[in-house]
Image (cartoon, rainbow, N blue to C red):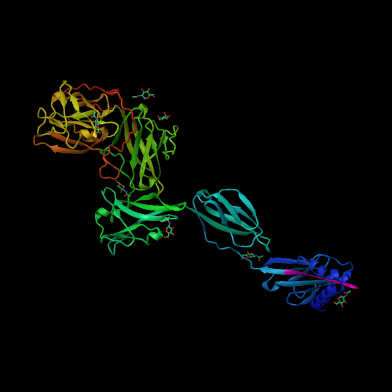
Amino acid sequence: MDFALFIFVAGCLQYTIGEYVRVENLLSMQQGIGWPHSLTVVEGHQALMKLSITLENQQSCEVTTPAGERFNVLHPPNSRYEKWTGGCGLRVRHVEASDEGRWRLTAFKPGRNITGWSEIHVEENLSSYPASPISIIDGEKHKEIELTTLNNNYCLVTQPFSESSLVSGHCRVTIDRATRAIQGNWNVLLGIPGRVSEMHVGRRVDVEAERLDVGYVHDTASKKLHLYCNILHTIKNITFCRFQKTGAEAGYNIMDGISDGSHSYYGNGFAEKHCGITLENPTPDDYTTWRCSVGVKQWVGTHTKDQTPLQALISVPQLSGQTTIKRNTNFDGIEERVIFVQENMTFSISCQSNISLAYCWFQHPNGSQFTPLPQLPTNNEDQLFWYTGESLQTGECGITFTHVKKEDAGQWTCHMGPTTHSGIELTDQVTVRVTGPLAANVVEVPANIGGEATLYCHTSNGNKPLNYCRFLSPRNLGITIDSSVTQENAILQRYYFTPERHLDYGDCSLTINPVHAQDLGEWTCAAVINESQMEARDVIVVYFDKSAPLSRAGIIGMVIGLLVLVGILAGFVGYKRGWKIPNLSINFPGRRSVANMQIQDDRSSVTSTSSSTQDIVQFDVISPVAQPRP
Ligand SMILES: *[C@@H]1O[C@H](CO)[C@@H](O)[C@H](O)[C@H]1NC(C)=O
Ligand SMILES: *[C@@H]1O[C@H](CO)[C@@H](O)[C@H](O)[C@H]1NC(C)=O
Ligand SMILES: *[C@@H]1O[C@H](CO)[C@@H](O)[C@H](O)[C@H]1NC(C)=O
Ligand SMILES: *[C@@H]1O[C@H](CO)[C@@H](O)[C@H](O)[C@H]1NC(C)=O
Ligand SMILES: *[C@@H]1O[C@H](CO)[C@@H](O)[C@H](O)[C@H]1NC(C)=O
Ligand SMILES: *[C@@H]1O[C@H](CO)[C@@H](O)[C@H](O)[C@H]1NC(C)=O
Ligand SMILES: *[C@@H]1O[C@H](CO)[C@@H](O)[C@H](O)[C@H]1NC(C)=O
């Protein structure tokens, strides 16, 4: 029987006869009684279809496949087919691509037969959904993440370390604000039409923050050293690219396409956000720590605006040597940094590392920990301390406290966490002394008769000019001194102003050479600090110590260059001592810093004497006393 002709005839009948009830319903019945009308099946699954109307006294149920094959469901041509349900229905096992199309079912009984059909769509059995990682910029807002392009009814999305969420319809989620917390492998279970088992899709989500990709390439064959600081994941454009060797006074202004013969641009161009330098025939000096600074601009509204440059440190190890990230801390004989600060004033401590840092924190002498965070833009009274320094990227770790208290004196430790590797934090130590406005850097100076001693007082609030500088000896001899008094024109042939120190920079420093017995005892240094109404003073005790003070240098502090002169006289040892603050930060011309100290206070009236308790050392030339500070 030709069904198509039948339908055609039925259709014609509907239009021509109109009200003829039985035939009118026939067309809709033929579609409507096939269940389901349309069925999506994934290869390998089973398809189930039937007529939704059951004929009483049904005599037979016949099937016509899309290929035109006809059979009675009770006598299928192969085992893939099987009668399904009590009425007229069919189960097709292991659906194949060739099963796609219209399946017709007809139920017969004497005097009546009904027909319906089901459209079958066969889909491939996808075992996996290959998908590349999804990359999101950190901080992006209202970001819509499309998890698949597959057709799905629903999906269940599980982000790393969080609850699952059920999404109806197309599988996408919206993130209010992207953070690294959403980074990782997302598990997605898809409900796909035509298959019973949910499909598992793993999507890798990377949250990328703008950052510098920093490193070096050593090309031994062509004798070149390349350093680079490329910006990743950015919408900004490079405006300049600068490299500077630590300790060097000047850097290199590197530009796309320009070379001076030995320093050239390295990279794929500013357009690719690449900033790099090639050093041709590098010298051993070039194997050191470099700082790169990358200038950037960005669209802000309708204008482009310069942004804070990105900076980082690149450590290039010597060719033969291994990279050592260990920083020399306070092993014996290495100088100790001391910060002098006046009570109630603002004070800062800073440490410098030669590698980029992820974080840093400080340990108070009493053991408390302080982690500096950026200063709040509003002058917030509640913020007692904050981060100071250029950036952690450039290895700077600094903290500023609004007020220093007597209890803050002592040894502070800064702990620095490098970005590049986990493990032990780098540490450095800084001693804080809470003093008067003028303070002795060493309060107890060992000296040997005939040797040399230096009494050094300095303004405690950073470098402030002194109007004059005077000393009072233990025998009440008053000495007024400035840098015009040198070793050649020394007062009493042995008191002179310590070379390379300056009243203008807050130094009040006396060198005694040679030391006589009457110089042992308590000295006073005093000066009027410009802008101050009162004279400031401190006390220094010079004590006899015939043993070599080499080992004490580190403990007592700030003595860096210690030259041992072996005297011509047998057994006579003289010391030449110079006090210099190690400037661990990068040297910028014109910057003179004493232990990176910053003082911000307008208080002009300050007490003039140090109230700190001082040990007054009794000395005896015949039986020497070596009294270390507690
Ligand atoms: C679909 O493919 C997967 C893997 O190839 C297989 O494990 C699964 O049994 C298949 N599903 C069906 C219904 O054949
Ligand atoms: C039922 O179908 C047969 C052909 O298979 C046809 O000859 C017959 O007229 C149909 N009967 C009715 C009542 O439609
Ligand atoms: C960056 O450069 C591109 C290409 O020259 C330009 O389209 C874009 O506007 C620039 N953006 C800024 C912030 O200058
Ligand atoms: C950092 O500096 C220390 C000493 O100043 C040095 O020993 C170390 O090798 C440097 N580290 C790097 C990575 O340059
Ligand atoms: C520091 O402040 C405290 C409390 O405000 C005050 O008692 C003390 O005298 C101040 N010290 C100096 C040296 O100004
Ligand atoms: C250590 O000193 C800090 C700052 O003065 C103070 O806030 C903290 O309470 C002290 N901690 C202990 C354990 O005394
Ligand atoms: C303090 O220094 C300023 C310049 O820095 C100078 O003008 C002023 O006269 C000085 N004050 C005293 C008291 O010397």
- Quarter-of-image position of residue 459: top left
Residue 579 is at least partly visible in this image: yes
Left or right of residue 50: residue 193:
left
Residue 109 is at least partly visible in this image: no
Left or right of residue 405: residue 81:
right
Label tally? 0
Q: Please state which of residues 591 and 96 is positioned toward the viewer in this rendering.
A: 591
Does 118 lie within the magenta span? yes
Question: In the rendered view of the protein, which quadrant contains the N terminus?
Answer: bottom right
Up-down relation of residue 175 to residue 445 (above or below): below
Question: In the rendered view of the protein, which quadrant contains the C terminus?
Answer: top left
Ligand 6's quadrant is: top left
Q: Which residue is outermost to the right?
A: 111
From which residue to which does the magenta span run? 109-119
Question: Where does the image place residue 303, in percent across and percent down from the top left?
Answer: 44, 52
Q: Which residue is outermost to the front?
A: 302
Q: Please state which of residues 43 and 582 is positioned toward the viewer in this rendering.
A: 582
- Quarter-of-image position of residue 362: top left
Does 459 lie within the magenta span? no
Up-down relation of residue 536 to residue 109 (above or below): above
- Quarter-of-image position of residue 144: bottom right
Question: Where does the image place residue 322, in percent across and percent down from the top left?
Answer: 31, 53
Up-down relation of residue 65 to residue 576 (above or below): below
Up-down relation of residue 505 to residue 613 (above or below): below
Question: Where does the image place residue 84, in percent across and percent down from the top left?
Answer: 79, 66
Query: What predominant SS class does the magenta segment belong to?
Result: strand
The residue positioned 79% from the left and 68% from the top of the image is: 31
Question: Where does the image place residue 388, in percent across and percent down from the top left?
Answer: 37, 40
